[in-house]
Amino acid sequence: MNSKENEPKKLTYLNAGHTVKSWLLSVDHKRVGILYLAAMTVFFLIGGVAAGLFRLELATANPDVLDNDTYNKLFTMHGIIMVFFFLIPAVPGVLGNFLVPLMIGAKDVAFPRLNLASWYIYMTGGMCTLAAILLGGVDTGWTFYTPYSSVYADTHVILAGTGVFITGFSSILTGLNFIVTIHKMRAPGMRWLRLPLFIWAQYATSIINVLGTPVLAITLLLVVFERAFGFGIFDPQRGGDPVLYQHLFWFYSHPAVYIMILPGFGVISEVIACFTRKRIYGYEFVAFSSLAIAAIGFFVWGHHMFTSSQSEYAALIFSVLTYLVGIPTAIKIFNWTATLYKGSVELTAPMLYALGFIGLFMIGGLTGIFLATMSINVHLHDTYFVVAHFHYVMVGGMMMAWLSGMHFWWPKMFGKMYNEFWARVGAVIIFFGFNFTFFPQFIAGYMGMPRRYHVYDIAYQPFQMLSTVGAFFMGIGLLISFVTLMSSLLKKENCGRNPWKATGLEWNKADSPPDPHNYPEPVVVDVEAYDYTDERIYQDA
Amino acid sequence: MKAVKNAPDIASSYASDWDALFTYLIVVSVIFTVGICACIVYFAVRYRRRSDADRPEATKDGKLLEILGSVIPFILVMTFFFWGAKQYFDARIPPKDSIEILVTGKQWMWKLQHPNGKREINDLHVPAGVPVKLTMTSEDVIHSFYLPDFRKKMDVLPGKYTQMWFMPEEPGTYNLFCAEYCGTEHSLMVGKLIVLKPQEYQAWLSTRMSDGAAPVVAGDDPVAAGQQIWEMNCAAACHTGKAGSIGPHIEHKFGTMRTLESGEDVLMDENYVRNSLLNPNDDIAKGYAPAMTSFKGQLDNTQIQNVIAYLKSQSETASE
């Protein structure tokens, strides 16, 4: 501090105000992003601790630490917190808020106050759900299947459901905000096909959020009505249909998978372009494949219901459409890999996460193809194979992308560069820990182990034991990454505008950390996206 | 401790067909995964950044990768689709000579009933070499009847019948799991499928229970019990098909198509009979007035199943 006394301190969004109020009432999109980051870290920790506890329990076939109800409440809590309070809002809430205006050359999102309101809505939903947990928990699974949730469960379903219902509105409003921002606030010269792929991904995600989330809200409301007032909607004793619930739930919750993963695709495109110094191969295909996934993703929900008693012919259609949604996803993987060809590849921490993402996400996607195959699904449905599959997509895919993005934009957010060595160590441990945790679950699932089993056949024990050991290493890796990132904040020296020598307005026109109004001078875009042959980006740092 | 298995048992020829498709999927997936990962590793090493002055040329976007990258996966997934769909449909239709077991799921047990009325809980005895059809319903929440060694599973729903079938080939004991989360003791809702030699099964059907009770007591025979309910409730008068009957002809018609007032043709199956007993005005037969009253609250699940068993037994004798 003393050595810098002579320099006038530069105004940034971080030091523009130091009071709690200046944060909690800030309408600066960057501060709202940091608010999301803080809240989400806490939710991630809670969801992770729940997972740690039941993973410990599952190391052996017989009950050791937990009773049946506690086990059921823990996996429910893990699912609800991770899906609705981490995976869905993570990239849009933190990176999206921070980067969407910065990447398109805007001073803020289109509706800054609405943006802050979204965070408060998210927090209100989160508090409801946390209250449900503190009052004794919920035991329905994150899927809230009826009539168990609406009639038989004896836990705090209404409160938890209300929490998820409320949080949904934050997704809808953030989606709306991004759509308008991307349409109306682009800087002069920022044509659609000059947009970074991260923006395309956010745009596709926002459309799903706006169209899909209301359906979840309606569905949860109906569950609450049946439970609280005895409406006969899903309970056959009252003339309802329990399978109707599954249709409504998956109509949102399958597209929600793309809400979670598409923003991750955006992150990966940015990181791979930067650390190969190349334009993403097939930019237009990658951009439009996001929209294709968003559109087709709305018509595949029935693949969660092949054994539910839905019509066999409906199942046939859902199966075909599910394969079709796999094609644009495959294209992305081929294009990212092709981008490496004849590039200048630098294996920084964000790049390690990004390459890990490609491999793990591909396994997640291919096992999704297994599950889209009708007869194969009948055996594997509701087994550990499904658990492994969606963790490869959600953790191997989305969480790796999220960590990649956090490491990539961390210097932009805070102006500090972390210790690259330890960040890489964290990335490698997480990668191997993850595989040890979830790969054995594919085998347990093929062997027929049903999911959500507290007590299980001894034949499955070796796989569960491996999972538990793997989860421990994954936890250590996450801790190393967390400490590495946080300890960088203690550093004095600033990392400069563009430490990675990346393209993009956020790196070339804004300081690190950016000024409260984003850019010191007006922004005009005169280059295509990812033009790594432009010498200007190498001189800015 | 039992020896660790690396695969579920292959308990039927369907299970080995299933494994063949599964193996095909694995082979294709491994080729893609290894191929892409090898490219990534090779490119990362071969094209590693040697100097900060590296300025790679942008590869010109070609259409070839995009076309091949769409067409090849498309052809492959269509092979998965047709194989998987055929296997699925073939495995949905139970053979005509199946024996029928009634399955009732209940938090947290499986209640099973044999054709002669003998009941058991959690353990299911079946004869080898005879296809077994399960007609299933639940008394409370959704359960799912899962036989991993046969690669088959089907959800068991309240208020509705679902069906699955399997072919027990080798005598032995196999796992039976509930696969749909159903509350506190979900993981304890497990049982055993015990496949016996046919003559052993016949002997088992007529043996006394361990407490000395007869295997089947009077009134347990589902067909006789169903007939009694049918006749007591005057259904016999309403639905015989004689001229002037109030209701449509039901007797001896199980398994046939029926035309409704709406003009729609529906199959008279378990769900049709059940729904007609509970909600008679849902599906009015063509040409009849909605005159029947509901049996909701008067007949329990077992009684409804007995009525169905009786109607079924009629059409079986009729077709012979």
Image (cartoon, helix red, strand yellow):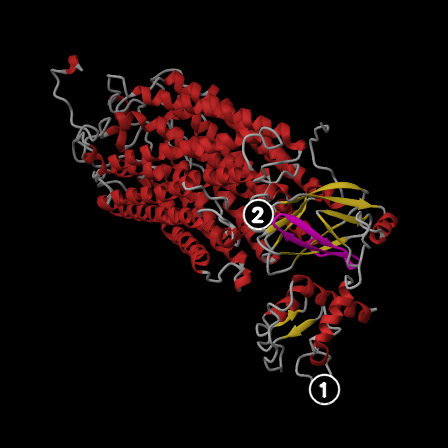
The verdict on residue A120 being magenta is: no
Residue bearing the label numbered 2 = B182
Determine whether the residue tagged by mark 1 lies in a helix, strand or loop: loop
Most foreground residue, B247 or B29? B247
Percent position of residue A146, x then y? 52, 53
For residue B243, the mark is 1
In the rendered image, the vertical position of residue B256 relative to residue A96, given as above or below:
below
Magenta segment: B92-115
Q: Can marks 1 and 2 be said to lie on one chain?
A: yes
CA gap, disc 1 and disc 2: 49 Å
Rendered residue at 59%/78% (across/down): B261
Most foreground residue, B246 or B259? B246
| Whether label 1 touches label 2, CB < 8 Å | no
Percent position of residue A155, x then y? 47, 46
Percent position of residue A60, x then y? 61, 29
The mark closer to the camera, 1 or 2, is 2
